[in-house]
Amino acid sequence: MRAMEEMYKDLPCISDIVIEHNAFIRKIIFSKLEDYPDKASLTNKLMVILEGMLNISVIYKMEQRLHK
């Protein structure tokens, strides 16, 4: 998300990278939740949040009029 905010001109590339590496990001999140008994469910929820934030950020960065 921070990269997307700092690199506005490269926004389409960054969102494509996140979407392309979705499975890799999911594996990282899953591996970091090793102490949680319901880590599969938590991973899914965190991925939904991440994808939602990505979509919201893309919309707001592309549509500057929404900031008003």
Image (cartoon, grey):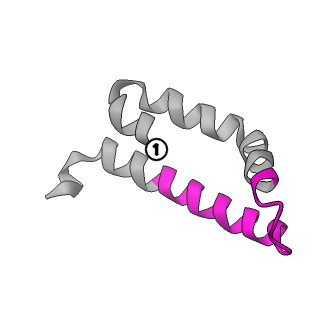
Image quarter for residue 62? Answer: top left
- Relative to residue 3, is residue 39 depicted above or below? below
Percent across and percent down for residue 43 are: 74, 62
Residue 65 shown left or right of residue 51 in the figure: left
**Residue at the (52%, 31%) spot, across then down:** 14
Q: Which amino acid does label 1 sit on?
A: Met
**Residue at the (83%, 60%) spot, across then down:** 34
Residue 33 shown left or right of residue 64 in the figure: right
Residue 14 shown left or right of residue 57 in the figure: right
Disc 1: CA contacts within 10 A as few (<14), some (14-19) or many (>=20): some
**Residue at the (35%, 39%) spot, across then down:** 5
Percent across and percent down for residue 61 are: 32, 43
Percent across and percent down for residue 48 are: 64, 63
- Relative to residue 4, is residue 52 depicted above or below? below
Residue at far left of view: 68
- Relative to residue 39, is residue 32 depicted above or below? above
- Magenta stretch holds residue 67: no
Which stretch appears magenta? 31-55
How many numbered marks does the figure carry? 1
Helix, strand or loop status at disc 1: loop
Q: Would you say the magenta stretch is mainly helix, strand or loop?
A: helix
Percent across and percent down for residue 51 are: 58, 54
Mark 1 lies on residue: 1
- Identify which residue, 53 or 41, lies in the foreground: 41
**Residue at the (13%, 58%) spot, across then down:** 68
- Magenta stretch holds residue 43: yes
Image quarter for residue 8? Answer: top left
Residue at far front of view: 35
